Image (cartoon, helix red, strand yellow):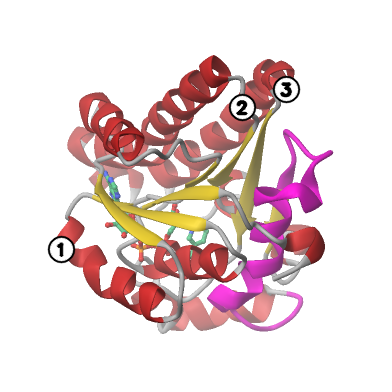
Amino acid sequence: MDGLFSLAGRSALVTGASAGLGAHFAQVLADAGAQVWLAARRTDRLQALQAELRSRGARAECVALDVTDAASVQNAFDTMAGAGTLPDIVINNAGVGLGTPALSTSEHDWDQVVDTNLKGAWLVATEAARRLSSAGRPGSIVNIASILGERVGTFVAPYAASKAGLIQLTKALALEWARHGIRVNALCPGYIATDINRDFLASVDGERMRKRIPQRRFGEPRDLDGPLLLLAGDAGRYMTGAVVAADGGHLVSGL
Ligand code: NAD
């Protein structure tokens, strides 16, 4: 890809790349010319995607990463450094959802959701920024938040709280790291069919939800391609601390 949205010469780390949106984002970034590091807890789950990307001429590597574990995050960056890469694009995509009433949600459930969606993004972003700023290199961090960080629904209390926290974290880091040339932005998808929500979207409640979306449809992963490339690369070079929704108008509907 030439021009404004080209990522030629860039290296991108995608967390939670073994499934869903993460796998899709990795393909989009690779197609735009970036070398892509696919990260997940188990690298065996990444190998099929790596092979597919390589068969299309992309440069794709795998690295083991549990975003909830600071040592694992450091090891992943050390592994990439050992291969001569310091990623200058980080997509904080790893996330877990949980659809349970607040009163049935255990402390363990809370910790799992908040540790993955919020602490995990913090650990990965700070490790990346520490290394980029020491190297005097600019970078771009895209936090995959959610419209549930801004609106709420039932049975999503820890998830909505974690994503609201991630939006504030995005703004706070953007403010601190502009001086290092590191941009930090949040992409807030609406409802996009993946493993995290497939059952819900197919349910009666999901159908009710669809009718409240102004565009009257759930999203597809490719609906996020433009916003992702805008935030990740130089097309968005004057954007930092931005919170960009791609949701068919769901947020503005207020429903
Ligand atoms: P998914 O469940 O298909 O994928 C989530 C990925 O994160 C998986 O690959 C999983 O293995 C990985 N992951 C979970 N815990 C991890 C950990 N500790 N370390 C490393 N990887 C870990 O879900 P998805 O729909 O593809 O969601 C991707 C992101 O997009 C999430 O942050 C989610 O909250 C966000 N999001 C999704 C939607 C949607 O409608 N699908 C909407 C808004 C936001």
Q: Quadrant of residue 217?
A: bottom right
Numbered circle sitting on residue 137: 2
Residue at image coords 54%, 20%: 135
Residue 55 image label:
none
Residue 14 drawn at (x, y percent): 43, 52
Picture quadrant of ligand 1: bottom left
Q: Say whether disc 3 or disc 2 marks the residue closer to the N-terminus.
A: 2
C-alpha distance separating marks 1 and 2: 31 Å
Residue type highlighted by circle 2: Arg
Callouts 1 and 2 close, C-beta under 8 Å: no
Marks 1 and 2, the one that precedes in the sequence: 1
Viewed as shown, does residue 7 lie left or right of 45? Answer: right
What residue sits right under mark 3 in the picture?
Answer: 178
Closer-to-camera residue (198/136): 136
For label 1, being within 8 Å of ligand 1 is answered: no
Task: Name the image quarter holding the C terminus.
Answer: bottom right
- Picture coordinates of residue 59 (x, y %)? 43, 63
SS label for mark 1? helix
- Magenta-colored span: 214-243
Any part of residue 99 in sight:
no
Residue 131 shows up from this direction: yes
Spatial separation of the CA atoms under disc 1 and disc 3:
37 Å
Whether residue 115 appears in magenta in the rendering, the answer is no
Q: Quadrant of the N terminus?
A: bottom right
| Callout 3 secondary element | helix
Instruction: Give SS at disc 2.
Output: loop
Callouts 1 and 3 close, C-beta under 8 Å: no
Q: Which mark is residue 44?
A: 1
Q: Residue at x 48, y 77 (%)?
A: 206
